[in-house]
Amino acid sequence: MPKDSVRSPLEDWSIWRRGYWFGERTFYSDFHLGLDVIVPHGTPLREPEEGERVLQGTFRQGGNTIHFKGKSGVLYRFLHLKDFNGELGHTGSTGVSTGPHVHIDISRNGSLELTNRANFIDPEAYFAMSEYENTVVRNSASGEFSLFLGGVRRKVSEKRSGLAALTLLQRKMEIVDLPEDVYDNLTKGKDF
């Protein structure tokens, strides 16, 4: 996926605290289909890519919700919104919510099949990949690093680190040092 085709729906994606993670057991589900990002009430959301709103409304659990279908065919859902104003609404705490945040889930094939877990993508990995496309991220504690190329994360083993360094020099890629916990969260999802 080209770097400019997908962007995170929140500015400064990596600084916001996370609530429930993708795949995590919650008080209402044994598998959380999205990611809860804890942000101040009224934080503006932006469209993650070119596309259109295909549904917006108020639902019992999700509160004010927008379904946004990207030109890539991916369906994004944004729940618990304060309103539907602006590019893609503002974060809130509507529906079943314990405080201001936005729940984001992403469906691969553009349709919402809540019973088909394999249809959902981890938003953390998806948006991190778009943020770090053609970039190398390095764990500042261990020195381990991963390359994000062509929408896929490629971990680099110590045995291949010399080859990776040469590749980086040839491609003039940026190296971003991340704290260990941020690196681990960024690289814990599956490659796709």
Image (cartoon, rainbow, N blue to C red):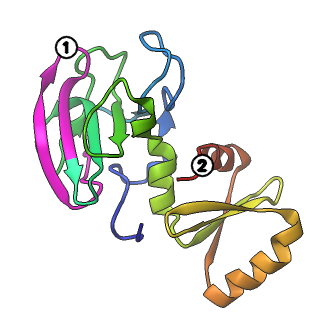
- Left/right of residue 165 with respect to residue 15 in the rendered view: right
Which amino acid, mark 2?
Leu
147 versus 80 height, above or below: below
The residue indicated by pointer 2 is 186
Secondary structure of the residue carrying tag 2 is helix
The residues tagged by marks 1 and 2 sit, at their Cα atoms, a distance apart of: 32 Å
135 versus 71 height, above or below: below
Residue 56 appears in which quarter of the rendering? top left
Q: Residues within 10 Å of mark 2 (few under 14, many from 20)?
A: many
Q: Residue at x 76, y 76 (%)?
A: 164
Residue 111 appears in which quarter of the rendering? top left
Residue 15: image location, x then y, percent: 50, 47
Q: Quadrant of the N terminus?
A: bottom left
Q: How many marks?
A: 2
Residue segment shown in magenta: 42-68
Secondary structure of the residue carrying tag 1 is loop
Q: Can residue 87 be spotted in the picture?
A: yes
Q: Residue at x 47, y 61 (%)?
A: 131
Residue 83: image location, x then y, percent: 14, 33
Sequence-wise first label, 1 or 2: 1
